[in-house]
Each structure stands twice: as structure tokens, then as C-alpha cells.
Image (cartoon, grey):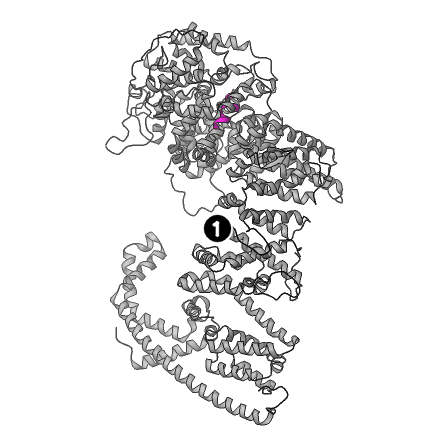
Amino acid sequence: MSQLSAEDEAELQSLLRQLLKSIKDRILGAPSIEYAEEILLHLEETDKNFHNYEFVKYLRQYVENSLGAVIEEATESCARGGHAVASGQDTLVHAVAGKTRESVEYKQMMQTLKNTMMVIVESLINKFEEDQLRKEEIHRESQHQQLNSHCNDNCSDSDSSFNQSYTFIKQEQLQVLAEKLDPSRPKEVRREALQALCGAPPSDVLSSESWSDLCRNLLAALADPNPELSDKVLQFFAKTFSSSPLNLTREIYTSLGNLMRLMNDFQKEVTTFWIRHPEKYMEEIVESTFSLLSLNSEHGSGSPGPEKALEPMHLVALLDIKATWFEKWMHAYYSRTVVFRLLQRKYKYLIAFYVFRYHLLNSNGFCPGIAQRTLYSAKELDYAYFVHSLSVLGRLLMYTNGRKLFPIKVQKRKDPVSLTDLIVILIRITYQHTKPSYNSLSPTSLVMEVLRNLGDCTECAVECLYQTPVIETLLAPIITLLEGKQVCSPETTLTHIADTLARIATTERGLSLFLYERNLVLADGEGISAAHVIVQFTLRLLAKELPFIQEAATSSGVRGAFIFVCRQMYNTCEGLQVLSPYSLHEVIAAAWKKTSSLSERVPTPVPGAITDTSSQELKNIVVWEEALLDNLLNFAASPKGLLLFQQTGAIHECVNYMFSRFTKKLQVSRCEKFGYGVMVTQLAATAPGVVALRSSGFVQAIVVELWSALECGREDVRVVHPKSTPMDPIDRSCLKSFLSLVNLLSSPYAVWELLGQQPLPNKAEYNLREIPASITDLIDRLIAVNSDVKMHSLFNYEQSHTFGLRLLCVMCCNLDSLLLLESQYKVSDMLLQSQKDNNLDPSSGKGDFIIDGLSVERNHILVRMSVIGGPSERRLPPRALQKGPDPYPWPMFSSYPLPECYILDLPKTIQGEQGKNSFQTWMDTCRKQYCKAMTTKSNIVSGNVVLFVSRYGRYLKLLREDSEQDLCLLMKHCQALLSQQKPPLDSASPDTLQGDYPGHDWFLSTVFLIVAGDVERALRILLHLSTLLTSAFLWPARLHKSVHLPVEIAQSGIYPVYSCTTHYVEMLLKKEVPLVFSAFKMSGFTPSQMCLQWLGQCFWNYLDWPEICHYVSTCVVMGPDYQVYMCVAVLKHLQQEILQHTQNQDLQVFLKEEPIPGFKVSNYLEYMEGLERSYRTMVLTDMKNISQRIH
């Protein structure tokens, strides 16, 4: 590439000068050099005439001449390589551009342009400087001539009465000076114009027609970095203030006010770019601001009044009343660190003055009606100052270093103001200004905003809100009303109190403070916790027993607000434990029934009729009724709460309400981070809960949502590319629906209610648009795919059938669910037939199996269904293929017996000698010996123990041939004995209560194996055990419709092992293993559901047989409360796995499918004894009260 000639350089210089002239106005309007550079860099994006400039056209032609051949060659090369066909046009352009940039011609062209442009720009700069010097000289000569002529014609005597060297000046001359002060003029011209302006009479300048232009240019000169210009402007302003009357100085003051506005705008915007500068730059800005704001404040010019001097803070408060500038400065750690450092070292008195003004104005009244205008009263100025101070202090308290600034010594106060003092003052403001106001600048609104921000941050809340004086201040009006005294404007005050209390109660520390700190509030000289005060007040509110509260104050808003506070407590296990004596569920249910009857009596509004009070009344009643249902529903967040909830008789209405909100995707409440998942899981663990979910339409909605994700896809998304083939067995788009189904069907009670006596449709024809509407339909379409018709009805057969098999596998992990599926649908026969059809020789079944994802999944399920045992007693084939020549070495089968490789060899049973202890002091001795034996010889405790269950005996041949008959005989004897203790129940009870115990009696089978199949001995043990409290929890069938339970509990279908044992498991887990509890809550699964499955089948398939025996013997010898401690110990043992699978979003599947390896009761016995010492009094007392009516 040849170099540019001299003629080319001259032409290029001319075109560049022309371009700069065209965009001169845009460059001159830039506030800084950096901004001007940004304009030039993005000129093509912002200037529609960019491609019409001759300079641009010249460069384009130059590039084409230099690189045209290179681009054509690169295009042909890339096209031959297939870029255009395979990857699209964008990839081709990038490839050609890349090759062009790498060429020698491109590098030579860029070097030539760089050298040429450097010469051209340097030449332009030199010419510009020469032109500027020439213009300045001409301006000086013309100005000198004009001033001389004015002096000769218009100057007054130097000894005039003004005794000042002022020069009378014409309006035309002021216009000329205004033009010379324009920021685009040279600095020397602007300096001389300012010099002339300082010599003119201020009255002439301020009253001239050119004042607006002069003012604008003066402010620009004041902000100029050149000190000569800014000093001249200050000199002019100072002279004007000292020599002009009040009506004229207003103009100057207004101008300075505009300058303050510019300063405030700069404060807000500087955060966007000061990180690009050295820290010194930011520190100077922050320190200059603090120095300005501290004027007068550091000298303590304090009490507000008409004679007080106006301070810079007043102007800043009027311009930015909510202190947005300070909020932005505190947002980033980079700037926040500098702010705190300066406040701590040099300007702490500034914060002290903020607090002083805030505290002082707190007692002098407020004026919240501030609007943007030009005239403010002294009271309004003080209130703006207060709002600004409150905003700054509220932002400071959000950060640790801000809170470290306290306590602060302030004027007119003996003791320093601490954090707690400041929060107490805040709360008292809401008591003093109780008039309802929707103005965001009202005192109450501002204070509540600060309190909400503090409450949302755990660390802030602990230091600021969770303090005894703060809680006492919040509860003071409540105690006053409870004592029969009156408070000012109770409705507004109580609403704000309830809002703050609810936010405190949502956190662990705040809830603990409410429940257990008994010295917070004193009533009648006796210490009482905040929780008791709140619930007592709520009950009296609902009963309308507070004499000094008007009827308006007992509206649904106030009552609902305090019920919501109680709700934050009773939707936790520990909160329900404290509040249970008050029977709050019964009170809320009674209020709901009364409200529901009222809504039925109010006449329905006629369409088109004029709205009257009756329609508004009906609307208020409906809102209040829904609020009561919502609060009742939250009792279902814990196992015992669910039992209380069921006893109210409103379970169907509440679940219908929940379903309506669920379909609208509404938030549970303002304090809830998770949806209705936990409550749905708790409901699905019980028979009445499942019935309510089914009747509400919730189950059908889950099925339809799953089918839409699995088979239909999203209809509102335009399909541009085909959907990729899922790599995981459960595609991510279907995972949520899969987990919802797992949660729903986790309990055997749910399976019994939803599938019991429900045959599969098995239709001869399926419409492709037919969507399943029930769990039975779903099993028929996804699991029991036993015909070509069903197979062809699925759009994604392999993916959908795999989904169904995975769901079947999880369901079969519950042995009771497995028994129902097997007895009702013969699922194992269907799976074996499918495996046979997958054989290369289906007729004989002796050929090789076709190994694919479905056959591997079926093989896994068949082994899981056929073999019973703990982690070291059976071997389950993996679901994944292995690398190497034999990807799946595990044998498949299409008929029984099972291949022997899936049954592990077990050690022989070690039997200990039978003891012959007397009954005198046997329990104490037994407990001591048991603990000693468990910690030393954990394998020889159980006596004559058999390691296997009835299925162990069938596969491992360890029982006699007639053992199954003995087990059946034992089951008949027990059924006959237990049936004598069952009273007649209501026909409206769930299906699971209509007959005998619907599941298998796994505890009976466990005892049968413990005694080695001796029917008489097993029956004798069960009879003796039935007289102990332990049997109510170890033996679920024992209390099925039992006379030993209150009738309402026996009819509920909710067993003590759920309402009592799992309730305390969740309570203790939250305190002892909080990470595991949080993991369950995040997953939408509950510890109670998993523990219910473990306990219901006596840990079969989860623990090895010795540990199952140890579990039973531990609960019998040590006490029934050890059932709770055992579950907590197991979950603690699985903590790391639980946390990991919570991240993987498959916690439910992991806990249900996987055994509990490595768990030894003896290893955790000491841990369980520690739990006994801490919780036995509470847990065992509640267990003993199961025969009493629930409260």
C-alpha cells in the first residue's frame, strides 16, 4: 500500500475541519472533555447524517481501495469452507473480518492512516491556537475602544454620593457582557467581561433585561475550574449582597439556590463515575460536602425559630428531602467506606447534630404537607430538615459501621443517645402522630419505612429491634388497653404496632424473643412474655371486650393485623407449643363461622343497581372471611397444627381458598418467602388433608400441569428450533411437577385415598388430545403402558414412560403403597411382561435383553420391589450405564426367581441368653444395662433375634417353610383383639377409616421376626406391649379408630405418630440441626412426611435388621420419646447428603429411595440421651396426653 500524497493529506485535513464544524454545537455542549470524547466515539449511533459527511465517504472509499481484494479473497475462502451454509451469515461476516484484520494490507493501511492523521491533527491544533490568539487581540482592542467612549460620555463624577467606583452602563453593554461570558468564549475574554461587570452598579445589572443570560453564565463561571473566573463571580455576588436592597438580593440568593440544586444533582450522579478515578478524588468530594453541611451545625446553632440563620442543610433538605444523594453514596462499599471513615474521624458531630435536630423537632410538631414551591414557612423548613435527618439516620443504621457511630452525645441531653434510644424515639413518633395519612412524607409513614428496612435485615434487626426496651415500647399501648385505659387514636396506632410485631416474629431471633423472654413485659407485677400479651390482646379484640376501643377500631383491619402477628408464631412448632393453651384455632374458626353466616344474610347486589351500603358491607364481610380462612389455613404448617386445623371443621373451605390463590399465583403473605408447598405436603400426609386437596381440584391441577409440561409443552412460546432431546431421565421442565407429585403421593394415606378401589381405565382407544384428570389416569397413561394404543397415544413415549417409571419407583419405596399397587394393579406382572417383550426371544425369555433406558429402569424397580433389606442386606442395580465393553453387567430377568446376585450374604444371627429379671426394679436396671450394652456389645442385645422379615425368609430361606402361615395367624389374632376396641365412626370419615387398618402392620411383623416366628410368644409380647404408652407410637395399627382416643381425633384419621412424634421431630430439628430444617423448608418437603414413612414401616428397607431391632428395643426400654430423638439422630446423620441433594433439587427422591448407610443406634445413643435431658419433660408430657381432648 502506497503512502498518501501531500494532496491527499490536504484534502483529508479540509474534510476533517468540515466535519468538526458540522458537529461543533454538540461538542461545545459537552460538560467535559471525557463526554466530548464519548460523543465522537458514538457519533455513528447518534448522528443520522454520519454517512453523508464527506470525511466519512472519503475514508470508506479509501478502505475499499486498500482492502477490496483482500475481502473478496477471504469471502471466497470462507464460503468454500462451508461457513455460510453451516453456521449462518453472521458467522461468515465474522470470519471474513477476522481474516482481513490479520492481513498485511490491513496492518499497513492502519499504520498509514495513523501517521497521516497525527500530522493532520497537529496541524489543526496549531492553526486553532493561532486563530484564538488573533481573535483575543481583536477583542481586547474593541473592548478598550468601547469602554473609553463610555467613560467619556456616560461616567459620573468620582466624588459622587455613592463613594464607590461604579460605572453607569447601558442595557446594550450588559447584553455584550452577557455574550462575552458565554462558556464557549476564551477564558481571557470571560475574565475581562467579569472585571467590567464588577465595576457596574448592581441595581443596573439585576434590573436589566439581560439578567437571565448573565445569571446563567455567571453560574457557569462559578463552576469553572479556573479560580480567576470563580473568584470574580464570588466578588460580584458579595458586592451585590452588601450594597443592594432586600428586593434585589433575592435574585442573587435564587441564583445561588440554583447552584445548590446543581450541586445536589452532582451528588446524585457522581456515584456513576467516581469509581473510575483515584480514591482521593472521591474523598475530596465527600469531605467538601460534609464540610459544607456542617456549617453552623458544628457551632451548635440549634433551637429552631424565626431568628435562626438559614443553614446549608435546609437548602439540601428542600432540594432532596429524602436524602437520595446519601442513599446513593451508601450503596456501594467503595464509597461507603470513605463516608464512614470521615464521619468517624472528623465529622461525627454532624451525625450528632442530625440526631439532635431529629430529637428536638420530634417534640415541636410536624408539618407534613410540603410541596414543591418557592416560599416555605419556618415550620416547613424545620420539618424538611427533620425528614432529611430521619432519612440519613435510617440509612446509617442499615450498616454495621453506621451503627458503630452510636452512642452519640447530643446537646440538651445528659446521656448519650444509643441505638435503642433512637429506635424508641422512632416508635413513639408513631404514637404521637396517629392521624391516618397517605402522604409518604408523614411522620408515621417515614418511621414505618425505617423500621421495615431495619426489620428486613437480620443483623440490623438484632441490634436495633430485638431489644427489651424496644419491645416494651411496642407493647405499651397494648398493655394500656388490656388494663382498661385509653390510648390516642387506637386504630392507627395498633395497625402500625401489629405491622412491626409481625416483621419481628418472622425471624428466628424475634420469635424466640416473643416466646421465651418472660421479663420483657410486666403485667400485675409478674413477668410475662410478649407472645402471651399479644395473643391475649388478640382474643379480646375478637371478642370485642376492650371498653375503650370504639367499634371502628375493632374493624377487620386491626383484628386481622393482630391475628397475622399470632400467625407468625403458631405456624411454627415452638410457637404453637406456647400458644396452644389459648385454643386460638377455635376462636378464629368461631369468628369465621359467624362471618360466613353474616355473608349469607346480606342481600346479593343486583347488576346495574346503584351501589349502596349493603354491597360495600358484603365486600367487607367477604374480605374478612377470606382473611380468617387464610389464618386458619396456616395452622397446617406443622403436624400438630394440622390436627387442630382439622378439628375446626373448616379444612375444605380453607383448602379451596388456598387453591384459588394457588391458581392465581398469589403470594402466601408479605412475610412468606416460600409458597404453599410445605402446607400442601403436610396436608398430603394425612387422610383428611388428601380428601380436601382432591375435592378442591388441587390434585387435578397438578396432573394437568404435569401433562402440559411433559406431553404438550408451552403453547405461548414460538418454536423456532426443535426441542432438544432431554439428557436427564426427568427433564428440567418437568422436575417441578415431578416433585409436586412425589410430595403429594409420599404418604400411604394419600395413595389409599386417591387410588384405593380405583381400577385403571385401560381404554381401547385414547385421543391424542385427551388429558388425564386424576392420579389413576396418570398411572394408566405413564406407568401401565401395556399396549400399543397407550404407547402411540404419547407424543414423547420414552421420556413420558421414564417419568412414570421414576414416579412408580418413588411410590414403591413406601411399602404400604407398594402393597396397594401390587394387589390392585399387578404392577410387577406388567413390568415383567414389558421386560419379556424387550427380549430378543420373547417366547422363551432366554434371549438377550435389549438394554435401553426403559429396560434398565424396569430392572431397578423389579429388584427394589422384590427384595426387602437395609443398606447391607440387598443390592440394587444402578440406573446408569458403565463405560467399557460391558455397559450393563447386571442380569435382567422377565420372571421369578430373582437372580441371586441381588441378594447379599448376611452374617449368622448371634443370639444372646435370655434374662430372667424380676419385676421389682426391672425398669431402672433394664435402662442401665441397655445403655451399657448398646455402647459395648450392640450386636447381642435383642436376645433371640432373627435378622430377616417375612420377605427375607422367602428369598433367603431363613424361616421355616410354614412361617408365613404363622404370621397370618398372628395377624388374625391381633385384628380380632384390636377390633374390639373400635367404636362406630361417622360415615363421612375418610375412606381409610371405613374398615380395618388399611396398611400392613409392619410393627407386628417386626415383633414376629424378633421372636423367630413363635406365634404364641409374639402375641403375648404384643398384648403386654399394648398396655404401655409406647405402643401408641410404635404400633400405628394399635390406635386405628381406637376407643383410647377422643372421638373427634379417632375420626380425623390423624395418628399420634404424626400429630405428636413428627411434630416434635420438626421442633427439635429446627433447634438442634437448623441447616437440615432449612433444607427441608427450601425443598417444599417436610421432615414429618419422611419420618412418617420411616416409622410407619419400622425403618424396613432403610436400616439393617439389627438397627431395626435396636430402634424397637430403645423405644420400649428408654421411653416413647426416644422415637423423636431417633428421627432427629437419623436426620443429623444424613446432614451432608441432605444439604447436597437440596442443591440438586432432588431431596425427596433421595430420602425415599436411598437407605441410611452407616447409622448405628449405639453411636447416637449418647446424643439421644442429651436430647432426653433437654426435652423429655415437654415431649413425654404431650405424649401422655394423647387420650385427652385436643386443645
Q: In which quadrant of the rendered image does the N terminus lie? A: bottom left
**x, y percent for residue 978:** 52, 10
Element at label 1: loop
**x, y percent for residue 638:** 53, 29
Q: Residue furthest top?
A: 1016
Magenta part of the protein: which range? 1052-1065
**x, y percent for residue 455:** 54, 45
Q: Does the rendering let one see residue 868?
A: no
Q: Does the rendering let one see residue 819?
A: yes
Q: Vertical placement of 423 versus 1120: above or below?
A: below
Reading the image, the residue beneath label 1 is: 404
Identify the residue at horizontal 43%, vertical 5% (top origin): 1016
Asked if residue 586 lies in the magenta stretch, the reply is: no
Identify the residue at horizontal 44%, vertical 37% (top origin): 734
Identify the residue at horizontal 46%, vertical 24% (top origin): 1173
Dividing the picture into quadrants, the one containing residue 593 is top right
Q: In which quadrant of the rendered image does the C terminus lie? A: top right
State left or right for residue 594 relative to residue 243: right
Q: Nearer the viewer, residue 1002 or 823?
A: 1002
Q: Nearer the viewer, residue 843 or 218?
A: 218
What number of labels is visible?
Answer: 1
Q: Nearer the viewer, residue 356 or 202?
A: 356
Q: Main secondary structure of the magenta part?
A: helix
Mark 1 crowd level (few <14, some 14–19, many ≥20, 10 Å Cα): some
Instruction: Identify the amino acid type marked 1.
Output: Lys
**x, y percent for residue 854:** 36, 30
Dividing the picture into quadrants, the one containing residue 671 is top right
Q: Residue furthest left?
A: 885
Q: Vertical placement of 265 versus 859: above or below?
A: below
Q: Residue furthest bottom?
A: 152
